[in-house]
Image: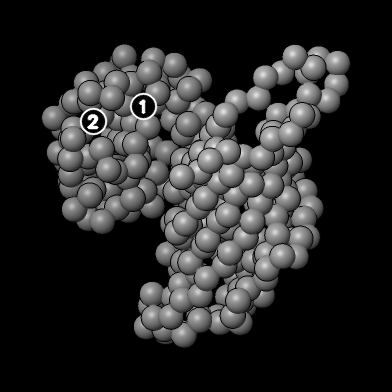
Amino acid sequence: MFAFVLMPFDPGFDDIYKLGIKETAEKLGIRAERVDEQIFHKENILERIYGQIDAADFIIADLTGRNPNVFYETGYAHAKGKLCLLLTSRADDIPFHLKHHRHLICGDSIQNLRQALEKDLDGLVAEVKNRDSVLAVRLTRTSGLLEKDDWTADAKVDLTFDLSNETTVPSPEIEAIYFDTGRGWTFKQDGRECAARTVEGDKNSVSHFLRSPVRRLQAGSWAEIKISGEKTLATKFGKKNKEVVFKDKYRVAGRARVRVLTTDGAFEFPIDLDIEVDEFPF
């Protein structure tokens, strides 16, 4: 997987590129390069940049300082339909008409950049791979409720996913669907608890088995998956927790993932959750 990096050729950006972007990408098995570290002979530098944008699986563009060359090259990448991840140290560097694009605001901390970038690169890799899939998965509706007693505060959430085929050909057969979350969650589908186990190689993630509503989807068709989840957010059990005061509302946020296994292979769909759970959700 190749990520082409657009940023000013300025020594002040070297640590951001080498320690923040390149090392993080390599950790995920992604080859990230800037044009100034490539060897080329026949074409001029602008032709080389255009060619690398065309060849890249996705683009990483640092808009810090509003460098006009970086903006021009990013516009070219958008016009070519490339997946782009925009970075900046200050929110003001992202113009209004670009704020709806995927972007990260990391301040002056390379550590913050690495953490945020790792999460978003994982999603970009999945999105690139999913281009070979006729199936798509989207989170369409969420709701949350907070339930408290004398000892615990529990989040109860309802999630609705659309499983769709927006192409002109039938989908492959669906063999299994898994919903991967952090630890502590239990889920039910149609009133029955979903089987769950720790994700292999990631002890902090749990995979929940979901039943597919269909064996395959014809061209232009869709199906719906509804699940209900529960997790304890705070507890007074234990000596250190006796003085805990429960909040009136909590925010449940993070990155989850739906994995669809088919006869044509496995496809991953990152899901961003951001749900407010309240005792009175209206």
Assess whether mark 1 and mark 2 are in contact (beta carbons under 8 angstroms): yes
Locate residue 115, reporting x and y percent. Answer: 52, 29
Task: Work out whether residue 241 can be spotted.
Answer: yes
Which residue extends farthest right?
Answer: 239
Residue at point 76% right, 60% down? 193
Q: Residue at x 43, y 80 (%)?
A: 221
3D distance between C-alphas at marks 2 and 1? 9 Å
Which residue occupies 68% across, 64% down?
Answer: 189
Q: Residue 162 location, x and y as percent?
A: 48, 66
Asked whether, in this view, residue 233 is left or right of residue 260, the answer is: right
Q: How is the image coloured?
A: one colour
Three-letter amino acid code of the residue under disc 2: Ile
Label 2 SS: loop
User: Relative to residue 207, is residue 128 drawn left or right?
Assistant: left
| Nearest the eye: 11 or 162 | 162
Q: Earlier in the sequence, mark 2 or mark 1?
A: 2
Check the image and report above or below for 62 versus 129: above
Q: Where is mark 2, residue-wise?
A: 94
**Secondary structure of residue under mark 1:** strand
Instruction: Depth check: give the residue in front, 234 or 254.
Output: 234
Q: Is residue 267 above or below residue 83?
A: below
Residue depicted at 44% across the width and 30% down the height:
21
Dot label at residue 256: none
* Rendered view: 87 above or below 164: above
* Residue 192 on image: x %, y %: 75, 65
Would you say residue 9 is visible in this rendering? no
Q: Is residue 80 left or right of residue 116?
A: left
Q: Residues within 10 Å of mark 2 (few under 14, many from 20)?
A: many
Q: Nearer the viewer, residue 99 or 125?
A: 99
Location of mark 1 (residue): 105
In depth, the one of 195 and 189 nearer the eye is 189
Q: Position of residue 261 (x, y in %)?
A: 63, 69
